[in-house]
Amino acid sequence: MRTLTRRIARGRRSLLFCVAVVIALLTTACSGAAAPGGGAAGQAAAPPGRDDTLTVTVYSKFTSREYDVVTKALNKLKDKYPNIEIKHEGNQDDDKITQSIRSGNPPDVAISFYTDNLGVWCSNGSFQDLQPYIDRDRIDLDQIPKAVRDYTGYQGKRCAMPMLADVYGLYYNTDMFAGAGITAPPKNTTELLADTKKLTQFNPDGSIKVAGFIPSMPFYANQAQYWAPNFGANYFGPDGKSDLADSPAWKAMFQFQKQLVDFYGGHDKVEQFKSGLGDEYSADQGFQAGKLAMAYDGEYRDAFVSDQAPALKFATAPAPVLDSLSAQYGGGFTTGTIIAIPKGAKHPGAAWELIKQVTLDTPTLVDLANGLKNVPSTTASLTDPKLVADPQFKTFLDIYGSGKLVANPPSPIGDAHLKAVNDFAERWQAGGVPDLTAGLKQVDAQINDALAQKPTGG
């Protein structure tokens, strides 16, 4: 699965550009034609007859091996509807989905790797409300963890369903732990800092040879949104506005980051070390190459290590939390692939049948999880005996079922707030922010300006 980590890590755009994109989504996506095959507004379209002949078009960003895995799962619908053909078009990103809706020629089903635009798509009607289908078919959504239900809806409107999930935790090199005399993974930030110091190796010239835990953000899965749950940090206050400057949790997170940077001798030394690490999904990625003793990452890293660094001895654990949040240990950040019926879909009734197949049917979810190496999204699929789970992968299944998951709240400004905080983190770690509170107030102002500019409805 491709997640937000990969999107933000590749050439972040400015906040102004993000707001412009969101405005374009809000003001243009609503011009698509009304759904020709749907029921009346607020009503579920009838399911197809068993012998109906039609083609359901699906857009996704899956390619190569992953495309084949997903196509096979989509085609399981033919067991119930043998005359329905599935036309799966891969390599279709969010922009292409939006353009298709705007032009009045959308797919019947849209699959997105990112939850970023869900608030926009929900609020402007680009994605149809699925609640009438859920009510009609008496679907029990409690089989999906609350945090996952939250990131697939917006302001009470269920406009998407989760199709597998990503869960984030801690990877650690067991040989390095043994060599440093560390017998268990860190459970809190005090232990994480202490272990980082024990595990780090310096060259004779003072440069970093092996980093215990790298503080750079954004880098690999070091993203502000993935760290935030470990510190109890929230993006928006009760009034819906950004309030980072008044949050002790955000300050604790950035102060911890500074402690790590200072331990390594400053930003320049960290950057020098980081420049020698491989790309996030290459075989010489830092943790896989033995350059990082510990790293935050998603469950999918287990498959990358098995494929690209099979000799590496490692284990996984929940991410360490702020010392005062010990009760939160065992949880973690989650996000995932979402699937929806776009406005203007020609066969919404059949589209819903397909969505049910790949989001609620246990055998289908297990096949997808085994093929894509992601976490299946229902509680029943987590314990299915056919789910392949080595001890490292099981950590993430346990985190998913912990009841302590945290997800990003869908936002009417897409991911502009995430980008703003990650940009700030980069400036902060470089020493470019002399006053933490004042700097966070500027971020609040940026985000609140973006919220104020968002168009209404659609």
Image (tube, helix red, strand yellow):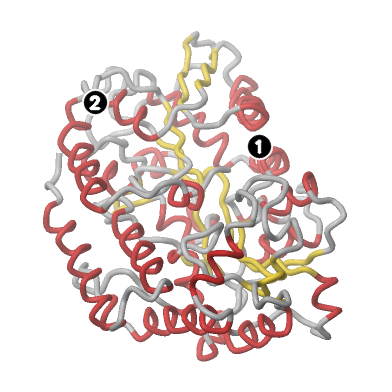
Q: Quadrant of the N terminus?
A: top right
- Viewer-proximal residue among 120 and 41: 120
Quarter holding residue 100: top left
Mark 2 → mark 1, Cα distance in angstroms: 32 Å
- Name which residue type carries label 2: Arg
Q: Is residue 86 left or right of residue 422?
A: right
Marker disc for residue 72: none
Residue 188 position, x and y percent, is: 60, 84
Dot 1 surroundings within 10 Å: few (below 14), some, or many (20 or more)?
many
Residue 112 position, x and y percent, is: 45, 38
Quarter holding residue 328: bottom right
Give me the residue at 55% from left, 59% from top. Answer: 221
Marker disc for residue 364: 1
Disc 2, SS: helix
List the single residue furthest toward the top. 53
Figure check: 79 above or below 146: above
Give me the residue at 38% from left, 63% from top. Answer: 422
Q: Is residue 114 left or right of residue 179?
A: left
Quarter holding residue 409: bottom left
Please report whichever mark, 2 or 1, sits nearer to the chain's N-terminal start.
2
Q: Quadrant of the C terminus?
A: top left
List the single residue furthest toward the front. 205
Give me the residue at 47% from left, 62% from top. Answer: 223
Disc 1, SS: helix
Q: Label 2 belongs to which residue? A: 102
- Viewer-proximal residue among 111 and 6: 6
- Name which residue type carries label 1: Thr
Residue 351 position, x and y percent, is: 44, 27
Dot 2 surroundings within 10 Å: few (below 14), some, or many (20 or more)?
many
Residue 189 position, x and y percent, is: 57, 84
